[in-house]
């Protein structure tokens, strides 16, 4: 079932409710007022708003370089222990 957004003119609270396309909400879920209005649906897609500050592969290159430095440090520590 679709989710619909309603606004209560009595208590000025917005709420969402699930119901069929041919049904409507008759009263506010908070105050019980019958002065409710269904608001238009928001069809904007917010899940695709990824901001990329780095190029693809930069994170992998950074990790490889960090691992390379860690390995070098570990080798130096092992040489000192011998």
Image (cartoon, rainbow, N blue to C red):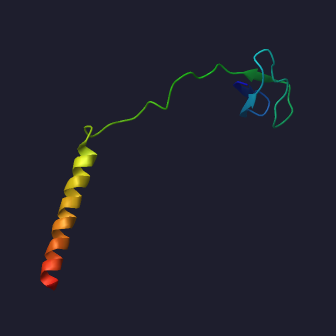
x, y (%) of residue 15?
Answer: 72, 33
Q: Residue furthest front?
A: 82
Figure quadrant of residue 33: top right
Q: Residue furthest bottom?
A: 82
Of the 4 image quadrants, the one containing the N terminus is top right
Figure quadrant of residue 41: top right
Figure quadrant of residue 73: bottom left
Q: Is residue 49 above or below residue 82?
A: above
Which of 57 and 10 lies nearest the eye of the viewer?
57
**Residue 69 located left or right of residue 40:** left
Q: Residue furthest top?
A: 22
**Residue 81 located left or right of residue 35:** left
Q: Which residue appears at 32% of the width and 37% of the height? A: 52
**Residue 77 located left or right of residue 50:** left
Q: Which residue appears at 73% of the width and 26% of the height? A: 6
Which of 1 and 42 lies nearest the eye of the viewer?
1
x, y (%) of residue 38?
Answer: 73, 21
Q: Is residue 38 above or below residue 71?
A: above
Of the 4 image quadrants, the one containing the C terminus is bottom left
x, y (%) of residue 12?
Answer: 73, 32
Which of 71 and 52 lies nearest the eye of the viewer?
71
Total tally of numbered discs in the picture? 0
Q: Which residue appears at 84% of the width and 36% of the height? A: 31
Q: Which residue appears at 87% of the width and 33% of the height? A: 32
């Amino acid at each position: 079932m679709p989710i619909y957004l309603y606004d209560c003119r009595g208590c000025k609270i917005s709420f969402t409710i699930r119901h069929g396309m041919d049904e409507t909400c008759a009263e506010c879920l908070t105050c019980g007022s019958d002065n409710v209005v269904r608001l238009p649906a928001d069809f904007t897609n917010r899940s695709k708003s990824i901001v990329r500050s780095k190029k693809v592969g930069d994170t992998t290159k950074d990790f490889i370089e960090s691992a390379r430095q860690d390995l070098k440090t570990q080798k130096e520590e092992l040489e000192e222990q011998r």
